[in-house]
Image: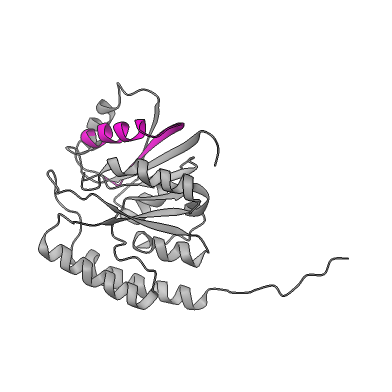
């Protein structure tokens, strides 16, 4: 890692006009706590129909020393596509992904960066230790995580937390597919990368409505799980016994 790190924060959003100005201020405060850091915030507009972009532009006018980019997708493509658009257009040595609904806490970012810089792991996976979601959402998520962990054994009890940190090299090398955001720890292990988990703060949603429905929570992830199992079983493994060079 270089003496002065470049940090890219990827923020996908869809109709989050009330949350984005607050999130921007919190992200700026979090980045200020990271030593020797340059930062870019990449907002990915996943086909919003409200004034999210307008209010976002107003909120960043007075911010200095941070590069802002807004990527507008042509239509609502979903979380995986929005995250991937941001990741592929990022320049950071370290890439952070975070939800735009204020349920993830930007105050956890400095510790995640510190772990990568000082331990040499390729990623830090946020675990929502005390979730502030509805009972139904928590139970469906717990069940889905248990099934996923039993079948593909990625060792992570909560992959639904968007707050994650990666080295740029690691995250850009991962294969892209719809639903990939649920399997990032698994994909890291499949590629031989290392990661740690970190309990992070989770907050209640104050503004806006959740964008997830039954298909998103159960049926879609199950189909993605089958694809992940196929990838694991078809992954190429080899070990060189020796090499002769003339």
Whole-percent x, y for residue 91 in the image? 49, 40
Residue at figure coordinates x 51%, y 33% from the top left:
4
What is the number of callouts on the image? Answer: 0
Q: Reply yes or no: does residue 45 show up in magenta.
A: yes
Whole-percent x, y for residue 40 in the image? 41, 34
Rendering quarter of residue 51 = top left
Q: Magenta stretch?
A: 21-47
Answer whether residue 53 is visible to the viewer in this image.
Answer: no
Rendering quarter of residue 19 = top left
In the image, residue 178 above or below residue 19: below
Type of colouring:
one colour
Residue at figure coordinates x 45%, y 64% from the top left:
187
Residue at figure coordinates x 22%, y 33% from the top left:
21
Left or right of 186, for residue 103: left
Residue at figure coordinates x 18%, y 68% from the top left:
140
Left or right of 155, for residue 141: left
Whole-percent x, y for residue 104 in the image? 25, 47
Left or right of 210, for residue 119: right
Answer whether residue 150 is visible to the viewer in this image.
Answer: yes
Q: Reply yes or no: does residue 137 show up in magenta.
A: no
In the image, residue 12 above or below residue 237: above
The quadrant in which the N terminus is found is top right
Q: Outermost residue toward the front?
A: 118
* The one of 135 and 214 positioned closer to us in this rendering: 135
Whole-percent x, y for residue 89 in the image? 46, 43
């Amino acid at each position: 890692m270089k003496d002065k790190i470049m940090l890219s924060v990827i923020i996908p959003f869809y109709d989050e006009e009330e949350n984005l100005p607050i999130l921007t201020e919190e992200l700026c405060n979090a980045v200020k706590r990271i030593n020797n850091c340059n930062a870019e915030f990449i907002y990915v507009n996943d086909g919003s129909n409200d004034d999210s972009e307008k209010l976002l532009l107003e909120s960043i006018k007075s911010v200095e020393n941070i590069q802002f980019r807004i990527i507008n997708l042509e239509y609502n493509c979903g979380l995986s596509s929005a995250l991937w658009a941001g990741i592929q257009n990022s320049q950071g040595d370290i890439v952070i992904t975070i939800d735009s609904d204020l349920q993830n806490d930007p105050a956890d970012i400095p510790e995640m960066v510190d772990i990568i810089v000082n331990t040499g792991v390729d990623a830090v996976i946020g675990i929502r230790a005390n979730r502030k979601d509805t009972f139904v959402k928590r139970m469906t998520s717990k069940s889905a995580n248990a099934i996923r962990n039993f079948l593909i054994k990625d060792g992570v009890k909560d992959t639904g937390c968007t707050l994650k940190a990666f080295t740029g090299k690691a995250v850009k090398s991962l294969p892209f597919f719809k639903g990939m955001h649920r399997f990032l720890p698994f994909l890291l292990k499949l590629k031989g990368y290392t990661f740690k988990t970190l309990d992070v703060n989770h907050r209640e949603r104050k503004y806006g409505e959740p964008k997830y429905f039954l298909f998103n929570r159960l049926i879609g992830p199950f189909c993605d799980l089958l694809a992940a199992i196929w990838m694991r079983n078809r992954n190429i493994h080899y070990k060189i016994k020796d090499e002769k060079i003339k």
